[in-house]
Image (cartoon, rainbow, N blue to C red):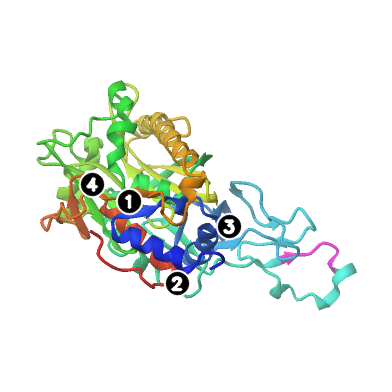
Amino acid sequence: MGSLKPDHLRTIREAMDRGLLPRWVLTDPDIYALEQEKIFARTWQFLAHESELPRPGDFVTRWMVHDPVIVIRGDDGVVRAFLNSCSHRGTLLCGADFGNQKVFSCPYHGWTFNHYGELVGVALANQVWGPELKREEWGLRPIPRLQAYQGLIFGNLDPAAPPLTDYLGDMRWYLDLIMGRTGGMEVRGVPHRWVVEGNWKLLYENFTGDPYHVQSTHRSTVELGITPNRTLGADRKGYQVVLQNGHGVNVTLYTEIPERPFQRMPEETWPLFRRHLTPVQHDLMQRASVFVGGVFPTLSFVSPLHGTEGDLYNFLNFRVWRPIDPCHVEVWSWFLIDRAAPEGYKQAAYKGYIDSFGPSGTLEQDDTEMWARVMQASQGWMARDRTLQYQNVMNYLMGWGRVDPDPGFPGPGTAYPGLVDAVSRSTHRYWFGLLTDGADGEGDLG
């Protein structure tokens, strides 16, 4: 564990037992090094949506933290993923973000690979290699596990990892709700990317477990009329749902079916909700205002209402928080919309996305500024002190010992009403359990 001594791990555990988290875990290089081995090499990570690869030969290049990946649909229609690295001398094989290729040719020495990752061409093969080069031994390295759910393609670097469906657990119910509600979603455009100051854990929990920040950080968007007022009152109730494996969801529901149900989706799509959802999901979807959640460790999503021209539109925004180092994250952001929605609605919703959660969007700028301020205040001596002599902790006590789960919530998971830190505390437990190979990773979540 490098210089992470047992005392340091004990400090983390003792803080979590009190609903707190040491602040130094955001910036500590030893923590980050351990996360590479214990978390990112063993958990399922989102790579692409099937709509990004509609034809044979279509490919995208992605990252699993520091491992470059090519995801390609073969001429047999099957989606595969390989390490984006030539097997000859390790060069980054493909530098394009997306495209359609029959083969990939290495720019360094000219080795060429097909859709199946097979080595099919070697420059000057007969002159310099001869029959001694066994091409079948020098294909691209496949990503050990590749599975999909509701069109979402995930990879895992651990050959012994549990199936994706087991890892998602009850999150599948919510993915069925937001991804399959009208028969399927599609990605519009390409994912935007930008680098921010922040630690990946901070960004993940900002979406998955922190609705508390909305009233302060995003207040201006309500005042400008591009975001609905989400203040909970007699007509709306919020829930934070704790799920397995560090996942979580926040759901805001109207107490009665609103005049424009189904998050204001066009009326012609309403029959599709009844066709593709269970009765319980259908009822919940009718009353839904917003969904926000995350699949641990680096995927977050939000299904909000935003607009720019006098009306509000629903869309689905997927995020991957790709760590670059302990203090910087490359944000990947996808816009998804129901395939069955009218074209005009799709275009209007995309504008709403760009103005809210795009790289220059109002909400995005709000969050980016706050993350940077956290990191700027977390790199000094007092913030990095591992002994906690300065009470150097972050507070996750909201709802601790005060809010009980609501047994009447219609979906799976443990649902807490109102504003609580339950998902963040659960995520911290799971994160710590992975760091310590399961030791001391369980306990009372408060």
Q: Badge 4 is on which residue?
A: 251
Q: Badge 2 is on which residue?
A: 161
Give the amino acid type for the residue marked by disc 4 in the picture: Val
Task: Judge whether 311 appears above or below 98 on screen.
Answer: above
Q: CA distance from mark 1 to mark 4?
A: 15 Å
For residue 7, which quarter of the picture?
A: bottom left
Which residue: 26% across, 50% down?
Answer: 397
Secondary element at tag 1: helix
Observer-nearest of 281 and 59: 281
Identify the disc placed on residue 69.
Answer: 3
Observer-nearest of 367 and 90: 367
Give the amino acid type for the residue marked by disc 1 in the picture: Met
Q: Which residues are magenta?
A: 120-125
Give the amino acid type for the residue marked by disc 2 in the picture: Ala
Observer-nearest of 441 and 391: 391
Q: CA distance from mark 4 to mark 2?
A: 30 Å
Secondary element at tag 4: strand
Quadrant housing the C terminus:
bottom left
Q: Is residue 446 left or right of residue 199?
A: left
